[in-house]
Amino acid sequence: MAELHHIRNYINGQIARPANRRAFEDVDPATGTVFALVDEASEEDVDAAVGAARRALRGAWGRMDADVRAVLLDRVAAGIEARFDSFLAAEVADTGKPVSLASSLDIPRGAANFRAFASVLKHHAGEFFATRWHGSDAINYTLRKPKGVIAVVCPWNLPLLLMTWKVAPALACGNCVVVKPSEETPATATLLGEVMREAGIPDGVYNVVHGFGPGSAGEHLTRHPGVDAITFTGETGTGGAIMKAAADGVRAVSFELGGKNAGVVFADADFDRAVDDTARAVFLNSGQICLQAERLYVERPIFDRFVAALVAKAEALRAGPPGDAATSLGPLISLEHRRKVLSYFDRAREEGASVVTGGGAIAMPGELAGGAWIAPTVWTGLPESSAVVREEIFGPCVHVRPFDEEEEAVELANDSPYGLAAMLYTGHVSRAHRVAARLDAGIVWVNSWFLRDLRTAFGGTKQSGLGREGGIHSLEFYTELKNVCVRL
Ligand code: NAD
C-alpha cells in the first residue's frame, strides 16, 4: 500500500510536526477509504501557535499600514486562484462533494472573501463629531484597532469558504489568527498556509492547528488565555461549550450556529422558480449547508403539484464519483453523520410520515460502495411537534406541509428554536415585504436562495447565532473602536 500523505499543522510560517507525534485519519466520504493522516496538535502546539500570533501582532503585521495589508490580501486571493486545482482536489477529497459544486462555489468564494474584505478595509469611514460642551470646543474621532489574536473554529460543510469568511476580515483588520479546521476537512487550511507564505504574509499571522473539539485542539485553543476573541461556526451545542470557555477572561464571541430553516411558497409565486430554488435549498451539498431548507410550507391550491415537482427534482439528482461532471449529488460527510441522518429517517417512518421519495441509504457500486451515500428524501404528513420537523438533521431531506392563510404560514415558519434563514416565494410585492418583515430569521430570501452579497449582515436569531458578520459588521467584531477626544 502506498504511504499516506500527511496533513500538517502550520505554525509561525512553518509546516510543523506535532509535539506529541499523534495523527488521525482523513477519510474520503465518497469511498470510505483513508487517504491521508492528519497531525493532531497538542496543547504545546496550540500554545506555540498562539505565541506566534501574538509576536506577529507586536511585530511587522501590527505595524503594517492598512493599505499594504489590503494589497497582501488581494495577493492571497490571487494565490488561491493560481492553485485552484490543488484546492479543488483537496476539498473534494475531504468532503466528497461534486467537482461541479466545489469549482463553482467553494474555491471561488475562498478567493472572493479575501478580495471583498481587502476592499471593505480600504473603503470604510470612521466617525467624526465637532463638539461644543460647557464653552469648550473639541473634535471626536474614532480609530479602529485590531482585537488581537483570534481563534477561528470551523465546520466541515464548506471548509475553505467558511474558514476564509472569518480569516479574511480578521486579517484585514490587523489581527492574527489561529485556525482550528474541522477534523473531517483539514486539507485546505494547511494549503492556505502555503499561499499565505507565498503572498508575503509575515510568519505567525496565520496559523493552523488540527485536531478534535473536547480534550483536543479545539478546546485547547478556545481555553487559551492568549486568545482575545473567538469566531465559531458549527452546532449550537458546541457554541454553548465554547461560550463557557470564553467566559474565562470575558472574551468576545461571534457564533454562526445550527438552523431549521423554513421556506414559504404562496400559490401566486412563479411556480418553476420556487421549485428550482427550493430544490437547490434542500439538496445542494447533500443538504449540508447552514442555509438549507428542511421545512417547506406550501399554499394548499398548489401543494400536490409542488410536492410532485420537488420529488421529480430529487429523483433527477445523480449520485456518482465526485470528479464526474454528471454527478450532482455527493455523499454525506461521514458514515457517522449518515447514521445520525438515517435515525431521523427511521423516526419519520415511525411517526407516520408519507415518504414521497427516498428514505434510506443508497447502495453504490464499486469503490463508492463504502461511502456515506444517502437518498434525497421528501416527507409529508408529520405533525409540527415531530423531532424530524423541529431538529436540525443536516441532510438532503425536507418535510412539506400545506397551509391556507398567510398568518398561519408565518406562525408555522416562526415556530422554531432556530432563526438563521427563511425563504419566501410570492408574486405579490406587498405580501413579499409584509411577510419578510415578520419571518424571524437573520436573512430572508425573497424569490431567491443563497444569493449572497458579502457586504450584507449575516447571522442568525435565537439559537442560530450571536452577532453579525459581513462588510462593516465584520469590522465591528474584528476591531475595537476607540474614540479620541481633542480639545481645540
Ligand atoms: P461542530 O459543532 O460539531 O464542530 C465545529 C467545530 O468545532 C469543529 O472544528 C470541531 O472540532 C470544533 N469543536 C467541537 N467541540 C468543541 C469544543 N468543545 N471546543 C472547541 N471546539 C470544538 O459542527 P460541524 O458538525 O462541524 O458543522 C455542522 C454544524 O455547523 C451544523 O449545525 C450547521 O448548521 C452549522 N453551521 C452553521 C453555519 C452558519 O452560518 N450559521 C454555517 C455552517 C455550518
Image (cartoon, rainbow, N blue to C red):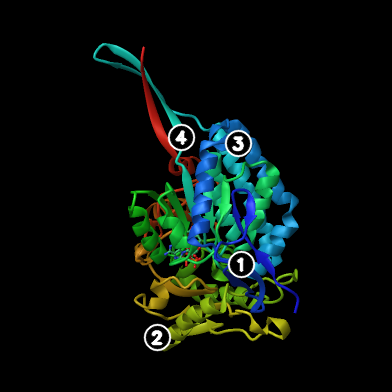
- Determine whether, in the image, residue 176 is placed left or right of residue 195: left
Query: Which of the two labelled residues, at mark 2 and mark 3, occupies the earlier sequence position?
Result: 3
Q: Residues within 10 Å of mark 3 (few under 14, many from 20)?
A: many
Q: CA distance from mark 2 to mark 4?
A: 54 Å
User: Going 56% across and 55% down the picture, which residue do you hit?
Assistant: 163
Q: Position of residue 267 (x, y in %)?
A: 48, 65
Query: Which of the two labelled residues, at mark 1 and mark 4, occupies the earlier sequence position?
Result: 1
Residue 317 versus residue 41 in the image, above or below? below
Q: CA distance from mark 2 to mark 3?
A: 56 Å
Query: Which of the two labelled residues, at mark 2 and mark 4, occupies the earlier sequence position?
Result: 4
Q: Which residue is mark 1?
A: 38
- Nearer to us of marks 1 and 4 is 1
Q: Which mark is residue 351?
A: 2
Query: Which of the two labelled residues, at mark 2 and mark 1, occupies the earlier sequence position?
Result: 1
Residue 132 versus residue 124 in the image, above or below? above
Q: Position of residue 243 (x, y in %)?
A: 36, 57
**Res. 175 visible in picture:** no
Query: Which of the two labelled residues, at mark 1 and mark 3, occupies the earlier sequence position?
Result: 1
- Determine whether, in the image, residue 415 is placed left or right of residue 6: left
Along the line of sight, the residue nearer the viewer: 233 or 43: 43
Q: CA distance from mark 1 to mark 3?
A: 31 Å
SS label for mark 3: helix
Q: Which residue is mark 3?
A: 69
Identity of the amino acid at label 3?
Arg
Q: Which residue is mark 4?
A: 145
